[in-house]
């Protein structure tokens, strides 16, 4: 499974339209990959809380429409990072706003939507302005060279909650994708927890972080792809960078067969 991880850098002085044009060009340059991944909240700004409301959009808004077209033109499955989604509130007191990942198939169809379950901010930011998602999402991603690969979705702060990944594993995930806007000051947690989720679930972990500095937050970069044994197969630095890697998904099954630790689980 050929995967491209687009570690995007951005600051404060770029309109959403300009950034979207830049992202679309980067995605289209990844034709030939099976899966292309973007970071969390790149259109609205991961920590730019004050602009989230004006930059929120529905699932058929301008960013989603541009991503759909980019996926189709590149002929890839595109994990579009996430947007600030504005929809209809579900319950009384809800915002009707979510941190939502969109995945488009190679024909541009929206094939999955994941609303971030664990909101980051300790009373500010996401918990104050957004609703929590409730649904786990695992989807089959087609590949050019073999059968589809089952991919589990999560977003950034979710990485700190191992029970979510156990549920994705139990839904058949062999690859776990994590887009993020994870700051530099805690980047050691980002790389460590990615390896931990790979080792404990015997899954490949694909982590796509943000680079640059926006809203006075320096982003950590250091996107990485970790194999099911915990080895880091590809790692980015701190700047904008695209990782391109051919993941051997058959190796996941071989590792699970040769070291069958998951069969020894006693609590579920
Ligand atoms: N956007 C986020 O979820 C940030 C998470 C983070 O900074 C952390 O877990 O640390």
Image: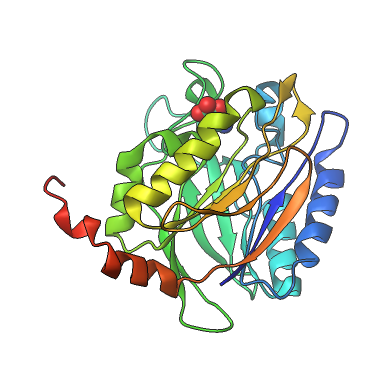
Q: Residue furthest top?
A: 123
Measured as percent of width and height from the top left, residue 119 is found at 47, 30
Q: Is residue 125 above or below residue 247?
A: above
Quarter occupied by residue 244: bottom right
Measured as percent of width and height from the top left, residue 205 is found at 49, 53
Quarter occupied by residue 8: top right
Q: Please tell me which residue lies in front, 127 or 81.
A: 81
Q: Is residue 14 above or below residue 135?
A: above
In-image side of 70 versus 224 (left or right): right
Q: Please tell me which residue lies in front, 92 or 102.
A: 102
Q: Residue furthest left?
A: 266
Q: Residue at x 15, y 54 (%)?
A: 264
Q: Residue at x 76, y 73 (%)?
A: 73
Residue 84 visible in the snapshot: yes
Q: How is the image coloured?
A: rainbow
Q: Quadrant of the N terminus?
A: bottom right
Measured as percent of width and height from the top left, residue 212 is found at 78, 33
Measured as percent of width and height from the top left, residue 3 is found at 62, 65
């Amino acid at each position: 499974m050929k995967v491209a991880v687009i570690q995007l850098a951005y600051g404060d002085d770029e309109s959403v339209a300009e950034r979207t044009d830049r992202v679309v060009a980067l995605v289209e340059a990844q034709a030939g990959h099976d899966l292309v991944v973007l970071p969390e909240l790149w259109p609205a700004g991961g920590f730019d809380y004050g602009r989230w409301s004006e930059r929120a959009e529905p699932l058929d808004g301008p960013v989603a429409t541009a991503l759909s077209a980019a996926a189709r033109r590149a002929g890839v499955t595109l994990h579009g990072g996430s947007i600030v989604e504005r929809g209809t509130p579900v319950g009384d007191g809800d915002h009707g706003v979510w941190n939502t990942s969109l995945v488009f198939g190679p024909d541009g169809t929206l094939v999955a939507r994941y609303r971030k379950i664990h909101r980051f901010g300790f009373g500010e930011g996401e918990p104050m302005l957004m609703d929590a998602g409730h649904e786990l999402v695992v989807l089959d991603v087609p590949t050019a060279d073999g059968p589809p690969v089952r991919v589990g979705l999560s977003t950034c702060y979710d990485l700190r909650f191992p029970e979510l990944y156990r549920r994705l594993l139990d839904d058949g995930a062999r690859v776990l994708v994590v887009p993020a806007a994870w700051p530099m000051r805690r980047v050691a947690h980002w790389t460590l927890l990615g390896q931990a989720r790979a080792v404990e679930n015997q899954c490949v972990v694909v982590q796509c972080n943000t680079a640059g500095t926006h809203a006075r937050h320096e982003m950590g970069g250091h996107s990485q792809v970790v194999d099911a044994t915990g080895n880091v197969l590809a790692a980015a630095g701190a700047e904008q960078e695209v990782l391109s890697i051919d993941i051997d998904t058959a190796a996941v099954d071989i590792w699970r067969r040769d070291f069958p630790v998951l069969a020894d689980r006693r609590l579920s």
